[in-house]
Amino acid sequence: MVLTISYFAWVRERMGVAGEEVVLPAGAATVGDLIAWLAARDERGAYAFREPQRIRAALGGSMVGVDAAIGDANEVALFPPVTGG
């Protein structure tokens, strides 16, 4: 399954790209699985996702937790916590 990943803020800076298309590896069923796979894939991912508990995600434009199933979603956004003021 091909998944489009968009990176935002410092996640984008650490990954070195605004986004990419990946073939979701077998066994990557949740957002947390995807983050773990990205972290293990290369040095950029290890740096961007070294604190996975800080990463927020959206599937198809809806905020989800890391335990959310990717299912047949074709897009995920990964970003750091958002603050406002």
Image (cartoon, grey):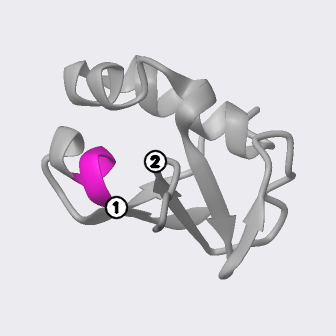
Q: Residue at x 49, y 55 (%)?
A: 78
- Mark 2 or 1, nearer chain start: 1
Of helix, strand and loop, which one carries label 1? loop
Left or right of residue 61, residue 65 in this image: right
Residue 12 visible in image:
yes
- The relative height of residue 32 versus residue 51 in the rendered view (above or below) is below
Tag 2: residue type? Answer: Pro
Q: Tell me if label 2 and label 1 are in contact, CB under 8 Å.
A: yes
Front residue (pair 32, 4): 32
In percent of width and height, residue 29 lies at 80, 43
- Magenta region, main secondary structure: helix
Q: Which residue is mark 1?
A: 8
Residue 36 visible in image:
no
> What label sits on residue 35 in the rendered view?
none
Stretch of the chain drawn in magenta: 8-12
Q: Residue furthest bottom?
A: 61
Front residue (pair 45, 84): 84
- The relative height of residue 44 versus residue 81 in the rendered view (above or below) is above
Front residue (pair 48, 85): 85
| Magenta stretch: includes residue 59 | no
Front residue (pair 26, 20): 20
> What label sits on residue 80 in the rendered view?
2
Of helix, strand and loop, which one carries label 2? loop
Tag 1: residue type? Answer: Phe
